[in-house]
Amino acid sequence: MKYRRGWIVLLLLAFLTPLGIIAAGGAWGEWNLDGIKDRAGFVPDGMRGSAAGKSEPPLPDYTVPGLENGLVREGLGTITAAILGAGVTALAALALVRIKRHGGIS
Amino acid sequence: MHIPDGYLSPQTAGALWVVSAPLWALSLRNIRRRMSERLVPLIALLAAFSFLIMMFNIPLPGGTTGHAAGGVLIAILVGPWAALMAVTLALAVQALLFGDGGVLALGANAFNIGFAMPIAGYLVFRLLRGAALPGGRRFAIAAAAGGYAGINVAALFAAVELGVQPFLHRLPDGTPLYCPFPLDVTIPAMMIPHLVVAGAAEAILTGGVVAFLGKYHPELFGTGAGGPK
């Protein structure tokens, strides 16, 4: 496999991702409707409409069903989400570049 | 910095799709025409790297969190056009699978984090790098400065896109329809933490990885540091 060491480093990173969710608080400007209400004092109409029409993503906030409660399970869920997400991202990149290069996946 | 859906008006989000779509096309064309086959798996690896690094949230002043994005590092290795595609794919997976960042807002987020960040950081890197070679101190410092500049440019774009919403879209009584915070709130709220902490994190990541790879794998910079012209 090309760049084998690079992939090993990524796997290590994936196993460390539970550290990345320890930090308290979320990113500025990425609150849900309750968070907006706390900070602005109201929920703007346009945001409400957008939230109503929004479908839940398969793995919201990098959680995996069945791996939500408890530190260890949550950590395993995060690692699973990390490996899955990184894998899908890499495969999408390979597919996209190869389709464009050869007119078909090779 | 991943703008969720609902914060930008459909008009703003749509406009940024219109800006980003041709950039994605240019990115693919550039990868297809100018990059050697051996770099294809490297681009996939770097896209996965970008996805992972954005999961490492660090506490920022003001009680919020942020993270590095890796866009400038990717641009230094494989050029800003390939960086755009790698980061866009990471953002798309984050939005579609994990609800991190909006789907309608993907055009905006890809422009900020996938385009503006790598291109700005790469330009700073090129400017400061001069004739320095991989493995040298100046090469790594130029990369660190590029990382610092890149993430702050991305944060500024996000802050402006959010902060113009109350001016662009409001009810007749003046109530904002989308992001309710104006520029004088969004710019300091985004920029102070990014200038102080997240920028430093991106600088350390970019400079550190470039220093390491420059020393042990200088061959990786054969195409990247020269960049696709």
Image (cartoon, coloured by chain):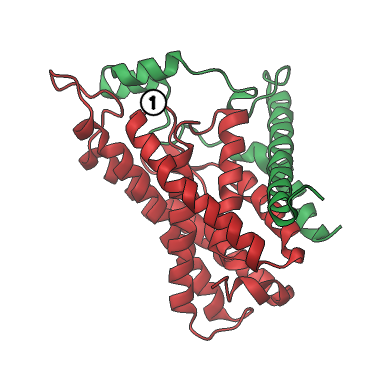
Q: Is B137 or B114 nearer to us in this picture? A: B114
Q: Position of residue B41 (x, y in %)?
A: 75, 57
Q: Neighbour class for label 1 at 10 Å: few (<14), some, many (≥20)?
A: many
What residue is rendered at 72% in x and 63% in y? B39
Colour of chain B in the image? red
- Place residue B213 in its image quadrant: bottom right
Return the residue nearer the eye: A56 or B228. Answer: B228
- Quadrant occupied by the N terminus of chain B: top left
Picture coordinates of residue A72 (x, y %)?
73, 27
| A3 relative position to A60: left or right | right
Report which quarter residue B171 is drawn in: top left
SS at circle 1 = loop
Q: Residue extending furthest front?
A: A103
Q: Residue furthest bottom?
A: B131
Q: Is residue B151 positioned above or below B127 on the image? A: above
Query: Quick check: B67 above or below B101?
Result: below
Kindly identify the residue that appears in the image at 50 percent across and 62 percent down: B203
Along the viewing direction, whichever of A18 and B168 lies nearer the viewer? B168
Q: Does residue B58 appear in the picture of this structure?
A: yes
Chain letter, colour green in render: A
Q: Give the residue at x 33% y 29%.
A: B9
Quadrant of the frame with the C terminus of chain B: bottom right
| Subunit bearing disc 1 | B
**Dot 1 corresponds to which residue?**
B6
* Kind of residue at disc 1: Gly
Residue B46 placed where, x, y %?
Answer: 66, 55
Residue, far left: B173
Q: Residue furthest top?
A: A52
- Horizontally, residue A18 falls left or right of residue A55, namely right
Q: State which quadrant residue B207 falls in.
A: bottom right
Q: Position of residue B158 (x, y in %)?
A: 37, 44
